[in-house]
């Protein structure tokens, strides 16, 4: 299939490696598109034929701002192509980026490495000339060393005295940096991209981490990231295990910061203090900083929750479980925030949620994403539905995924009058901009009761109160609790719930609370 190279193309390739991307999920599709945007020839592979067809047609199978435009632009240049053939990528690539998912194991906390092992197992026997395999997936420390051994065992180029000939002229020529590898080598290059900012995070990351076992591998990676490095992005060169740990440590730190401020919210609730003001005051200390210090309903998504669990599981296996025991507490604080929203709402609705009509704003784990994996919003919607409430969930882009994950509630893509009419309460769980812009004065008359729980602190509480709403937000002074709050507080919705005495203390009306309404 490959056509012979012209001399000018061959010259370009001595400095510019040809890249492949294995796995076209969130990470892989973004990486492939962005590397093509940076000027590389990129061929991406996936075992899912329909995904490849959609990508080849210029369609991104998930929601990510800016990515579809870049995909189409780079397909048009011919630099970016998609295939289901591993033979084709093995012949094409100087640097192969492995971007398959490592989800949480079914029935366990560890990472499921089956996709990673399958991808490497399929690629390795096809690698007949010098090249670099680069792991980008998030993995337990020690995984890269195992994969390096697999490559050493299975890749023919490691058994044929260096640069073996490929199947034709084009495939035979490795780029200069790849040829210097002498065979097939492995590098680990963790990815730090955030959903919703994936394009910007890939084109200009905060840092590049290269876990390598030789200067030649470092050289090949530097060639593959030359346009990024030229922007001044710092490069940290290290061993495999440190590179693997950077990713899990970073996500653990971020999760810890979020749970720290959410733990402060619990304490604030006990004394009617304001966690938002507390967070703001902390953020001015440059040693602390304000990022990832937003309290609310906690973290979710495909990374933070599963990564802290897999990290603990790996630490246990390594005999250092005690060092990461605190991550279990981080997880528990995070889950308690979900229960807390249910408790606040029940308190505001006379202690009972059964048969209430509830409007949940948000299904995605965060705005600008259609990802509902471990979404706090969907988890709360589920808890509410289990109390016997009638729940309608609104999300601008995630209802398609949410319907499959939680079929027991109703959905709408917009805050239509019909979904608001007759509702007993609104619960904001994902801070989409369009929710923050809702007009409480317009919505109010449609509601049966004007109760709003702002679990992400995205609304202007004073504005909602002025429009006659009971406005409650976790970790903030409660203002006026609606009349009819029972002496006995609602039964916690899960074993992890706050004890009733603490709930009562946390939601009592302080003498100094501002009057609202
Ligand atoms: C995360 C990491 O940020 C990224 O570096 C890594 O590569 C993958 O995991 P992502 O899952 O896209 O990225 O989401 P992120 O923006 O980190 O948010 C995670 C969760 O934390 C969301 O549910 C978000 O709502 C929540 N969050 C974030 C808070 O509750 N408070 C905050 O202050 C920040």
Image (cartoon, helix red, strand yellow):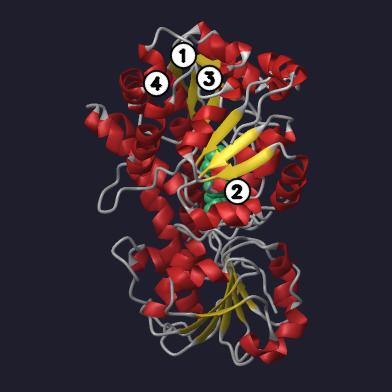
Q: Residues within 10 Å of mark 4 (few under 14, many from 20)?
A: some
Marks 3 and 2, the one that precedes in the sequence:
2
Q: Front-most of 305 and 137?
A: 137
2 vs 1, front mark: 1
Q: Is residue 404 left or right of residue 191?
A: left
Alpha carbon separation for disc pair 2 and 1: 40 Å
Marks 1 and 4, the one that precedes in the sequence:
1
Where residue 198 sits, quadrant-wise, is top right
Task: Say whether mark 1 is within 8 Å of ligand 1.
Answer: no
The disc label shown at residue 195, or none = 2
- For disc 4, the marked residue is 241
Where residue 179 sits, quadrant-wise, is top right
Could you say whether the residue bearing mark 2 is in a helix, strand or loop? loop
The disc label shown at residue 210, or none = 3
Q: Is residue 382 left or right of residue 431?
A: left
Could you say whether the residue bearing mark 4 is in a helix, strand or loop? helix
- For disc 1, the marked residue is 164
């Amino acid at each position: 299939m490959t056509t012979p190279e012209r001399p000018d193309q061959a010259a370009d390739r001595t400095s510019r490696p040809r890249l492949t991307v294995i796995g076209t999920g969130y990470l892989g599709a973004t990486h492939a598109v962005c590397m093509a945007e940076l000027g590389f020839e990129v061929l991406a592979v996936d075992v899912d034929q329909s995904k490849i067809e959609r990508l080849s047609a210029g369609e991104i199978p998930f929601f990510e701002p800016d990515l579809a435009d870049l995909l189409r632009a780079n397909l048009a240049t011919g630099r970016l192509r998609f295939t289901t053939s591993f033979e084709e990528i093995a012949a094409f690539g100087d640097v192969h980026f492995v971007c398959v998912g490592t989800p949480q194991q079914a029935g366990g906390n560890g990472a499921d490495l089956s996709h990673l092992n399958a991808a490497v197992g399929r690629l390795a026997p096809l690698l007949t000339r010098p090249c670099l395999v680069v792991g980008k997936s998030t993995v337990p420390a020690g995984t890269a060393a195992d994969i390096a051994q697999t490559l050493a065992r299975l890749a023919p180029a490691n058994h044929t005295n260096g640069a073996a000939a490929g199947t034709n002229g084009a495939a035979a020529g490795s780029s200069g940096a790849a040829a210097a590898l002498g065979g097939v080598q492995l590098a680990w290059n963790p990815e730090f991209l955030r959903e919703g900012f994936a394009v910007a995070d890939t084109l200009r990351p905060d840092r590049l981490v290269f876990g390598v076992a030789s200067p030649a591998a470092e050289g090949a990676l530097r060639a593959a990231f030359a346009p990024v490095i030229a922007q001044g992005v710092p490069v940290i060169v290290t061993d495999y295990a440190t590179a693997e740990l950077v990713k899990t440590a970073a996500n653990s730190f971020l999760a810890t910061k979020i749970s720290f401020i959410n733990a402060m919210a619990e304490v604030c609730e006990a004394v009617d203090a304001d966690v938002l003001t507390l967070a703001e005051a902390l953020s001015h200390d440059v040693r602390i900083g304000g990022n990832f210090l937003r309290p609310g309903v906690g973290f979710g998504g495909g990374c933070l929750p599963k990564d802290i669990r897999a990290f603990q599981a790996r630490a246990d296996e390594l005999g250092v479980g005690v060092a990461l025991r605190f991550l279990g507490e981080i997880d528990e604080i995070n889950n308690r925030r979900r229960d807390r929203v249910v408790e606040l709402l029940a308190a505001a609705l006379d202690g009972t949620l059964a048969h209430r009509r509830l409007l949940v704003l948000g299904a995605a784990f965060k705005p600008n994403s259609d990802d509902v994996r471990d979404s706090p919003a969907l988890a709360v919607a589920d808890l509410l539905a289990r109390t016997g409430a009638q729940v309608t969930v609104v999300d601008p882009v995630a209802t398609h995924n949410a319907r499959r994950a939680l079929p027991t509630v109703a959905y709408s893509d917009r805050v239509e009058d019909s979904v608001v009419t007759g509702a007993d309460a609104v619960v904001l769980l994902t801070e989409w901009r369009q929710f923050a812009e809702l007009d409480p004065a317009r919505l109010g008359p449609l509601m049966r009761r004007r109760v709003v729980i702002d679990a992400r602190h995205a609304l202007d509480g004073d504005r909602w109160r002025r429009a006659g709403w009971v406005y409650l937000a976790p970790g903030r002074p409660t203002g006026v609790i609606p009349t009819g709050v029972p002496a006995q507080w609602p039964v916690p919705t899960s074993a992890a719930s706050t004890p009733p005495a603490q709930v009562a203390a946390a939601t009592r009306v302080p003498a100094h609370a501002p009057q609202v309404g």
